[in-house]
Image: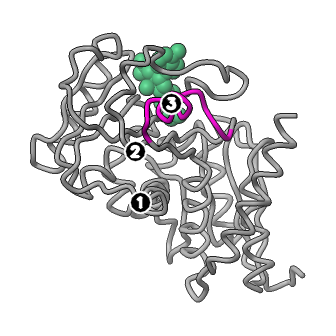
Amino acid sequence: MISAKARVCGLMGCPVEHSLSPLMHNFFAQETGVDFAYVPFKVEEDRVEDAVRGAYALNLAGMNVTVPHKQRVIPYMKDLDAAARAIGAVNTLVREKGGYKGYNTDAPGLLRAMRDADMDIAGKDWLLIGAGGAAKAAAFVLGNEKAASVVVVNRSADRARALAEDMNRQFQRNFMSAMSLEDYRTLPDKEWQAVQTTSVGMYPDVQKAPVEDRGFYRNIRNAIDVIYTPARTRFMDLVEEAGGKAVNGLNMLIYQGVEAFELWNPEKKVPREVIEKARQLMREALEGQSR
Ligand code: ATR
C-alpha cells in the first residue's frame, strides 16, 4: 500500500511508455516492504529543467533519467558522483538538501552483471563494440576495473577515437585505443573479452550483428551484449557458435535498477531472491512486449 508518507520516485524520458522500470521498482518496493511509489513521466526536451525543478518542488525522493535526457539533466544537478562525472551521463537523481545529486548506476549495474557472468576484467584484453552512451559507461567500468587493454571498435572511427582519448586522459594510462568497425581484420590474433554496446541486433532487427564475419568471433572468450530484446541476440549466437560464452543485458538493466533503488532507500538491500523474481517478471513482460 502507498500511504500519504510514501517516498515517491519517477522516471523521466521521452518516450517512457515501454520502460520496465516502473514494474521493477514497484516490485522491489512491494517485496522489501517499503512505502514507495515509482511513476513514469514523459518529459519533452525543452522541459528538462522544469521537470528537475518541479520534481524537487514536489518532494520527489529521486528520479531515473533515460533517453534522451541523460546528459541534459547535468546542469541542474547540485552534485555528481564520480561515475556520472566521468561518463558524462546521469541516470539516477537522489534528493539532497538544496537539490539532486546525479549518479550513473549503469556502470555499477554493468559491473554486477559482468561479475554474475564470471567475467574477469582486470588484466584482460577487451573489445568494446560501439562508442555511444552505453559504451561510455562500459569504458568507465573497464578502466576502473583495470582492464589490461581496450580496443573501441565503432562504425564511426572518430567517435571511437574521442572515447578512447577521453578515457586515457581520465584514467591517466594509455589502455584504450580505437578502430573502425570495418578494420576488425587487423585486430591482433589473441584472446579477447567483449562488450557489445551498439543498437545493432535490437528488436525488431534481430537478424543483424555488428560484424557478420564468423572469423571475428573466433577469439572472443566471454561477451556481454547490453541488448535485452531479444533475449538472445545474433551477436550472442555468433560468439557461442565460435566457442565463447555470451550473456544479454537484462542483468545490467536489473542491477542498475537495484543500485538506484538502494540509493533512494538506503535502509534496504534488495535481496538476491527478489532480484531473481524480478528477472522472471521482466522476462515475461519483455516477451509480452515483443509478441
Ligand atoms: P546508446 O546510448 O544506446 O549507446 P548511441 O549513443 O546512439 O546509443 O550509440 C549507438 C551506437 O551504436 C554507436 O556506437 C553507433 O555507431 P556510430 O557511432 O558509428 O553511429 C552504433 N550503431 C548504431 N547503428 C549502427 C549500425 N547500423 N552499424 C554499426 N553501428 C551502429
Residue shown at the point (78%, 68%) measured from the top left: 26
Give the SS element for disc 2.
strand
- Relative horizontal placement of residue 31, taking residue 257 as reference (left or right): right
Give the SS element for disc 1.
loop
Residue shown at the point (48%, 21%) measured from the top left: 210
- Relative horizontal placement of residue 70, taking residue 289 as reference (left or right): left
CB under 8 Å between callouts 3 and 1? no
- Relative horizontal placement of residue 132, taking residue 67 as reference (left or right): left
Q: Nearer the viewer, mark 3 or mark 1?
A: 3
Residue type at the position of mark 1:
Asp
Numbered badge on residue 259? none
Residue closest to the eye, 283 or 160 = 283
Residue type at the position of mark 2:
Asn
Residue shown at the point (32%, 57%) measured from the top left: 120
Numbered badge on residue 222? 2
Beta carbon at label 1 within 8 Å of ligand 1: no
Q: Is residue 9 above or below residue 162?
A: below
Q: Which residues are magenta?
A: 231-244
The answer to whether residue 145 is magenta is no
Q: Which residue is mark 1?
A: 118
What kind of colouring is applied to the model shown?
Answer: one colour
Dot 1 or dot 2, earlier in sequence: 1
Give the SS element for disc 3.
helix
Q: Could you classify mark 1 by the number of other residues whose Cα lies within 10 Å: few (under 14), some (14-19), or many (20 or more)?
A: few
The quadrant in which the C terminus is found is top right
Q: Nearer the viewer, mark 3 or mark 2?
A: 3
Dot 3 or dot 1, earlier in sequence: 1
Q: Which residue is mark 3?
A: 241
In the rendered image, the residue lying farthest to the bottom is: 267
Residue shown at the point (31%, 49%) measured from the top left: 140
